[in-house]
């Protein structure tokens, strides 16, 4: 996944860049509206994180231009403008989400993942593979070299959440919501216990589950194996 960040506050921009780099995203960045528009039009991005109040070309003009040009990149607006009409204007001009400042990095990450998931809804992608493992969402099978690994419901949902993220780091909160929804919560210890069980079952089939922990951030599928 390749992202473009157009944000004129250097401390905020750098903080976002460092955080998303640590989570495995590929990023381009600029604090200038004119440069940001040029980058958006000349490169292919999955998501553009866009401030509204920018030097040279404002964010709303950038948004209108890229939509007029037919760019399909998702757009997440970051803005200190908190009025309801500002949010409506941004969404009506073609933004996919609108996040007001100040915000937590955790919320930004969650919104990015939600936007990217929406962009994948129409794609037929029922099988996820890594390191000899295959997760088939249609048949609900998890296999290693075509050997079935029997999982509980919660184990399957955790593996589905991680394999579908395609190498990106997924935090505990996102895993919990994917497994039990927003009205309950799975602790990190519970998630680790489920993963330990899946690792054991995988070893019994001769495989090493390619799920790694990035301390302080969450879990990811190591596709380099």
Image (cartoon, grey):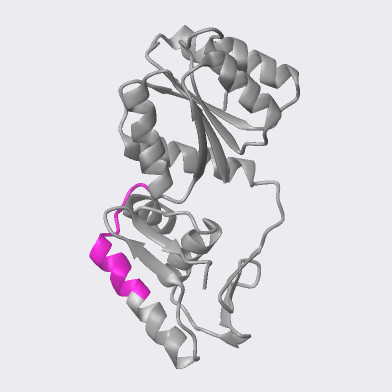
Q: Is residue 156 above or below residue 207?
A: above
- Quadrant for residue 208, please give it: bottom left
Task: Using the image as rendered, state which of residue 86 and residue 59 is in the foreground.
Answer: 59
Who's the residue at 33% across and 34% down the image? 15
Q: Is residue 47 above or below residue 224?
A: above
- Quadrant for residue 13, please give it: top left
Left or right of residue 65: residue 51: left
Who's the residue at 46% across and 73% down the image? 210
Left or right of residue 75: residue 51: left
How many numbered marks have been drawn onto this rendered protein structure?
0
User: Can residue 198 be seen at all in this image of the molecule?
Assistant: yes
| Residue 91: x %, y % from top left | 56, 19
Q: Which residues are magenta?
A: 181-195
| Residue 48: x %, y % from top left | 55, 30
Q: Is residue 9 magenta?
A: no
- Quadrant for residue 40, please give it: top right
């Amino acid at each position: 996944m390749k992202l473009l960040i157009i944000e004129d506050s250097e401390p905020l921009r750098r903080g976002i860049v460092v955080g998303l780099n640590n989570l495995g995203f590929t990023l381009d960045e600029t604090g200038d509206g004119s440069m940001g528009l040029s980058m958006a039009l000349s490169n292919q991005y999955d998501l553009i994180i866009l401030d509204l109040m920018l030097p040279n070309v404002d964010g709303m003009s950038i948004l209108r231009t890229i939509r007029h040009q037919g760019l399909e990149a998702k757009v997440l607006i970051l803005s200190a403008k908190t009025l309801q009409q500002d949010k409506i204007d941004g969404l009506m001009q073609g933004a996919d989400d609108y996040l007001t400042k100040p915000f937590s990095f955790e919320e930004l990450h969650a919104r990015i993942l939600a936007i990217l998931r929406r962009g994948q809804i129409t794609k037929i992608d029922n099988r996820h593979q890594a390191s000899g493992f295959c997760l088939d969402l249609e048949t609900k099978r998890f296999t290693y070299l075509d050997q079935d690994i029997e999982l509980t419901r919660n184990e399957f949902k955790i593996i589905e959440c991680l394999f579908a993220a395609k190498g990106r780091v997924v935090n505990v909160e996102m895993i919990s919501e994917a497994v039990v929804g927003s009205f309950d919560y799975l602790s990190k210890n519970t998630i680790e216990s489920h993963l330990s069980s899946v690792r054991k079952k995988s070893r019994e089939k001769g495989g090493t589950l390619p799920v790694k922990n990035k301390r302080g951030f969450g879990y990811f599928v190591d596709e380099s194996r």
